[in-house]
Image (cartoon, rainbow, N blue to C red):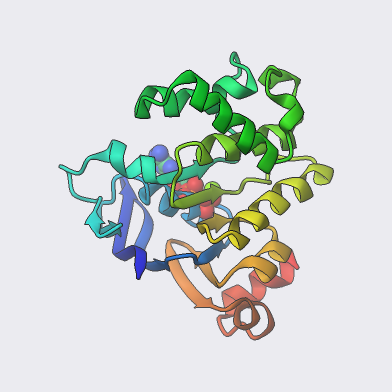
Amino acid sequence: MSKIKVSNLYKQYGDNHVLKGVDLEVKDNEVVVIIGPSGSGKSTLLRTLNKLEEPTSGSVIVHGEDIAKKDVNIDKVREQIGMVFQHFNLFNNLSVSDNIMLAPMELKNVSKEDASKLARKLLKIVGLENKFDAPIQSLSGGQKQRVAIARALAMHPDIMLFDEPTSALDPEMVGDVLSVMKQLAKDGMTMVVVTHEMGFAKEVADRVLFVDKGKVLEEGTPDEIFNHPKDLRLQEFLSKVL
Ligand code: ADP
Ligand code: MG
């Protein structure tokens, strides 16, 4: 069954045409990785999947509902879709545990005790069980990103979106974040991941999409995309990043 089905999606800012007829389908338990040059519309595409951006036209069906429509309950959509950003977007004035506990308590009326138990469980999953009370500022970038993943998971989403989660990290931090993401994928999470980590894409993706200048130019298995690319722009892109 498809969890996300984007059809003929267009997005423009003024006269900047950013997405030009994108189709994207994500099935239950699938990991879809989006690659492509900077400025090609990857973040914009990802952000339309939880209505952080309004499409200019086209449909974005998530869990059977067209979230491109005006009257959709956006809070409900976002409860089911977790998002992890390049720059973490954590509350820097709160502790690690408060960052994780906030949304379940405020949006789902979870008790403080249950939220705290959940935070402990999630911190264990992301390998930060000893950081429960730590201030966010005391963490490294890689640790912050793992807290951001735990925070997203605290809402029990059934889709996770990742927008270049490791691009702002020092190289030695990248592996820890990718291994948390790999474990999530293994556990059956449905994921859409924008990344420049081609090793991750090869190993974890069920499908890879190459986006350039607002269009999906090629789509296939990691083997097809990385070992037998057909599109010339994809070949050129890969020659630079591999
Ligand atoms: P990518 O993630 O592939 O680097 P983006 O989706 O961030 O690409 O951006 C694609 C294009 O859309 C760029 O030209 C960018 O300047 C433009 N853009 C993105 N967000 C906005 C916005 N909120 N307002 C105006 N232009 C934007
Ligand atoms: Mg981007």
Compared with residue 228, is residue 153 higher up or lower down, i.e. above or below? above
Residue at 49 percent of width and 50 percent of height: 160
Query: In the picture, which quadrant includes the C terminus?
Result: bottom right
Eyeballing the image, is 1 above or below 171? below
Give 9 or 188, whichever is nearer the viewer.
Answer: 188
Q: Quadrant of residue 130?
A: top right
- The extreme right residue here reads 172
Q: Name the residue nearer the viewer: 9 or 32.
A: 32
Quick check: can you spot residue 164?
Answer: yes
Q: Residue at x 48, y 23 (%)?
A: 102
Tell me residue 224's x, y (percent). 61, 83
Left or right: where 63 falls relative to 125: left
Picture coordinates of residue 186 (x, y %)? 62, 62
Vertical arrangement, residue 157 with respect to residue 45, above or below: above
Question: Left or right: 99 with respect to 58?
Answer: right
| Percent coordinates x, y for residue 164 in the rendering | 60, 48
Q: Is residue 52 visible?
A: no
Give the number of marks: 0
Residue at the (60%, 74%) spot, across then down: 234
Residue 237: where, in percent of width, then height? 65, 69
- Looking at the image, the residue that sits furthest to the left is 71
Q: Residue furthest top?
A: 93
Residue closest to the eye, 35 or 104: 104
At 54% from the left and 64% from the top, the residue drawn is 31
Asked whether, in this view, residue 221 is left or right of residue 170, the answer is left
